[in-house]
Amino acid sequence: MTGRTGARTETRGTPPAEPGPGGTAPPPPPAPPVAVALAHEIVPPALLDWIARLGPDLATLCGYQMGLCDAEGAPGRPGPAAGPDRRTPEGTDASGRPGGGKLVRPALALATAAAAGAEPKEALPAALAAELVHNFTLLHDDVMDGDRVRRHRPAAWVRFGTPLAILAGDGLLALAFEVLSSHPAPGGAEVTGDLARALRQLCLGQGRDLLAAAVPPTAGSAPPGSPGAAPGTEDTAAGTVPEISPEDCLRTLEAKTGALLGFACRAGAAYAGAPLAAQEAFERFGSRLGLAFQLQDDVLGIWGRPGRTGKPALSDLRARKRSAPVVAALASGTAPGRRLAKLYARPDPLGEDELALAADLVEAAGGRDWTLAEAERWREAGWESLRPLELSATGLAGLRELTGRLTDRSS
Amino acid sequence: MTGRTGARTETRGTPPAEPGPGGTAPPPPPAPPVAVALAHEIVPPALLDWIARLGPDLATLCGYQMGLCDAEGAPGRPGPAAGPDRRTPEGTDASGRPGGGKLVRPALALATAAAAGAEPKEALPAALAAELVHNFTLLHDDVMDGDRVRRHRPAAWVRFGTPLAILAGDGLLALAFEVLSSHPAPGGAEVTGDLARALRQLCLGQGRDLLAAAVPPTAGSAPPGSPGAAPGTEDTAAGTVPEISPEDCLRTLEAKTGALLGFACRAGAAYAGAPLAAQEAFERFGSRLGLAFQLQDDVLGIWGRPGRTGKPALSDLRARKRSAPVVAALASGTAPGRRLAKLYARPDPLGEDELALAADLVEAAGGRDWTLAEAERWREAGWESLRPLELSATGLAGLRELTGRLTDRSS
């Protein structure tokens, strides 16, 4: 599976330029959603103020991690991450603003506050806390997963060493709670408790991922008589059926990505002064949208175009990640699923032909269709959670504009 | 310097038995202070309940880290850490209770609540949060510092792997904030904000340590004309004068140990319903006592008897730590200080004779006396912070009983 909090999406802002169809110039990008534009205006300066509290060395590391400075602390978007994107103006990221990542979570917090009837900037503390925690997860997950590249640059632990990267993550967590407690939400809303719960969910999700990766699939572990265990056929020769059910996979993705997006929305509503029931509805909305977003991302991790994803084609298969389409295919009980299990159980790296074959097997086993259908189901369920709130058309439009950009990326 | 939060003290509970003077049986140990006994009664079961929220695998790791179970999750004090202590009954730790570390921070929180006039158990959330954060720092610091042994057993990262150890630390932090926010202190005291600030201080202190360790002393870095730079003498041939001033050292120790003990006391007072000014006074008390405690510990790291410290003699010198006595000696401008700098600059390991010489040089340069004097100064300053509060004799006696045990260990 992919990073704890939609990690891959962070690498997608600024891939190299690609010619449009037929070699013509790319079409002009759409304007960024209002909440995204506001997030890019008010969040990076505030982040810089907060991370300065960690002292110059950790602040530089955190700024580098967040794309706010280079590894020496010089401000602005650093070299390797800069570059035109066919969906965005040159030198900006997918949101149309320079530097600082896509700020998905801050934008969600601000848009939620607007939908809840407040000035979006009232939710700045929620926006900052969500982004600080997001970067905490990226710092620590990159260490835990051994991922060496982040936003087209060396991961922070590669550049600054593992100890400082761990410590910087800890520092960002401290700041997240400090932001919230120094700017209490109106009406005594318990946002620090909400963040603590979300943080625990993030840890649970990452733990499931780590443990699933650590336990090699057991030969013959499928129950006798199950499709995966059909004896005496070539398909079961490898005998490896990873013990992750599609339901487990959804639970993990919800914990890893849904929890923090759920927090961003809930806290956005809390800072807007929304009542508890509305905060809870917004949390469900964010959590379900986050799950849809991550499922979509797992599809892109196999079939996304490198020019858009910023990653090599088939990268999740190359790393033999058990992303949602793969899990669904392995659990499908189909012949392509069993052939995929064999490929995944091979100790040696897969060649290009085998990677292409693996992608075809995932698709033939129904893994792609299942994942896209689940993404759609959770997107719909997310919107369903907001129905009791009777939001204004304007507020809803802002949320739809933002989340449509997030989850409608099936190319 | 030593661990972020008085790490060494955690390894001292259960060294092998030593005969008393003249080979007679050891004297019976004194009864543990009241707050320590209470902490050992109510804190471990509550910790086990909380860590269960992280799921079975992380809970086992956390229980192992805290000395509440073995590496397979079986309850009780695990083998290698068990054993008689000449100051405590067999099979118990220095506090006279089985398992679970010494619970210094929880005991401080409970004793502070009592001193502030409440039932000590009212401060259980403060006690739990402090102990959870303490173990978070141990988990992460052991990874960052590469320390392989903790409480006479393999450190958690050695036993469970670095990724899970990092993640478990993150999980403990989440729980600490969850404990506090799910049990708000009376009168709206902002304990989560207090914890966030303390956590940031812990990170700042650890960052100073990491960065000081990472930068090798520069040849000839002492300013011309300063005692360390006297040219042409044998003493300066190594040319390495570590650029840590005694004041820097005190600041780092205060951040690494003082901050969390300060939080434990402040939060103990907050849960006792003490007014803000009293909370602040108790925080200063805890922070200063913590500094005294760590300075004392740094003396034991060189001159402590292995039977009491649970570490080999001269262990801090062997690791060439820049603990407080060493920093003071290096900055002393004395001939022994310059000889010590030469020894510390040697690339090869120091032999036993050289280690003994180094200890003598630290002492001759005044490093031991300075550290003990500073410990005394900060202990006194700690008590001074409580003077405006006009505490009851009983409340003060409980605190004195507890902190006397902590800081009066100069043998």
Image (cartoon, coloured by chain):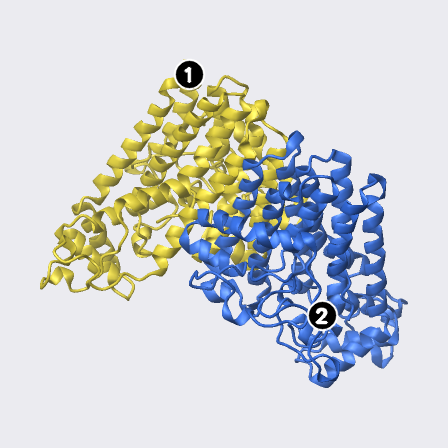
Chain colours: A blue, B yellow
- x, y percent for residue B126: 54, 31
Q: Residue at x 68, y 43 (%)?
A: A268
Same chain assignment for discs 2 and 1: no
Circle 2 sits on which residue? A301
Q: Secondary structure at mark 1?
A: loop
Q: Is residue B69 visible?
A: no
Classify mark 2: helix, strand or loop: helix
Q: Quadrant of the N terminus of chain A?
A: bottom right
Mark nearest the camera among 2 and 1 is: 2
What residue sits right under mark 1 in the picture? B391
Q: Amino acid at mark 2?
A: Gly
Q: Position of residue A194 (x, y in %)?
A: 66, 40
Q: Is residue A197 visible?
A: yes
Corner quadrant of residue A357: bottom right
Q: Quadrant of residue A188?
A: top right
Which quadrant would the C terminus of chain A be assigned to in this image?
bottom right
Residue at 58%, 53% in the rendered image: A41
For disc 2, the chain is A
